[in-house]
Image (spheres, rainbow, N blue to C red):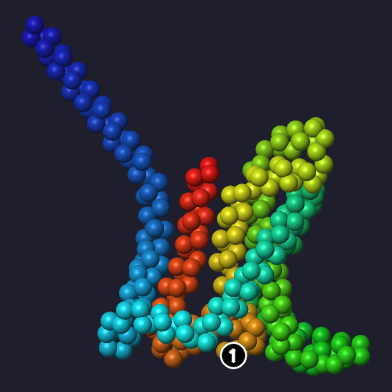
Amino acid sequence: MRRTRQCCIFRSRKAIKEYSGNRSGISLRHMRPWLFLAPSLGGTAVFVLIPFVNVVVRSFFQAVGGQFVGIENFIQVFHSQAFRLAVKNTLHFVLVCIPALMAFSLWTAILVTGAADSRSLYKTTIMLPMAIPVASVVLLWKLLLYPQRLLDQLVVWAGGRGQDWLNQGSAFYILVLTYIWKNTGYDMMLWLAGLDGIPKELFEAAKVDGAGSWQSFFYVALPGLGSTAFLVLVLSVINSFKVFREAYLISGDYPHESIYMLQHLFNHWFVSLDIQKMSAASVMVETSILIPVLLWSRKRKKRW
């Protein structure tokens, strides 16, 4: 009887140890991904989230004296003529560039997918603009577009009049072409990843059913690229704010009004130490971008 009780106690202890070991193993297995993500999450918190919270707080205070002013900074920013011009130009740039870039990069990705033998060569060639430094691109535009340079001389030689291409309405379209040329390779790689994720059997079944190339594209490829399109859209909008580098290096602090972007305005406020205006404008811009993205993402989750 005593031996049976001892055996039961021994088995119970062994079972408890095994359960504890399995439980710790399971918890460690669940914690492992978070341990790998910890450096990235820590860096994001330190360099992005905490500074953004600080900007939100500063938008309600005066930079000098730290006096609480409520929404007065937002009202001043909204009534600023320079802010309205910068917002209008930035929206115009985004609405023109993003659809053109997404359509052109998708078309490029389809062409590269069809060229199976030379796919690597085409990918490398189209990705090449991303490896070219911005300063080199700016130098090329200056050699081409500045007064009495190459393009100006060609126009005069053809019987036209020389123009300052960067100080008139053409400056906007030059900036658009620069952005598309620079970012086509990046978006093309995202589209290629999405196209590779669509099962080949779907295209083969559509071909067997008599679908042509356009029908396969519209009824097989496009529905399967929904998530990729959302990702390309968000990243393209983010990258569109980086075009300030080219505009600034080409035209300086005060470019033609058609390419006066939000980044120019923020740069002027930073130089003049208008921290409260810059903070309020940053909160307004981030909110206007973040809310549509969250609503669209939520809508997509409900649909799936």
Instruction: Write down the quadrant of residue 160 in the picture.
Output: bottom right
**Residue farthest along the left direction in this orientation:** 2
Residue at 21% x, 26% y: name it. Answer: 16
The percent coordinates of residue 151 (x first, y second) are: 82, 85
Q: Quadrant of the N terminus?
A: top left
Taking the image as shown, residue 161 lies to the left or right of residue 294, namely right
Question: Three-letter amino acid code at disc 1?
Answer: Tyr
The percent coordinates of residue 223 (x first, y second) are: 66, 45
Q: Is residue 142 visible?
A: no
When the figure is inspected, residue 288 is found, relative to residue 143, above or below; the finding is above
Residue at 50% x, 53% y: name it. Answer: 297
The percent coordinates of residue 260 (x first, y second) are: 59, 83
What crowding class fits label 1: few (fewer than 14 Cα within 10 Å), some (14-19), or many (20 or more)?
few
The one nearer the camera, 38 or 106, is 106
When the figure is inspected, residue 40 is found, relative to residue 71, above or below; the finding is above
The percent coordinates of residue 26 (x first, y second) are: 33, 35
SS at badge 1: loop
Residue at 80% x, 32% y: name it. Answer: 208
Instruction: Write down the quadrant of residue 85 in the picture.
Output: bottom right
Instruction: Write down the quadrant of residue 276 in the picture.
Output: bottom left
Label 1 belongs to which residue?
A: 254
Say how many tags the image has.
1
The one nearer the camera, 5 or 245, is 245
Residue at 16% x, 14% y: name it. Answer: 8
When the figure is inspected, residue 144 is found, relative to residue 18, above or below; the finding is below
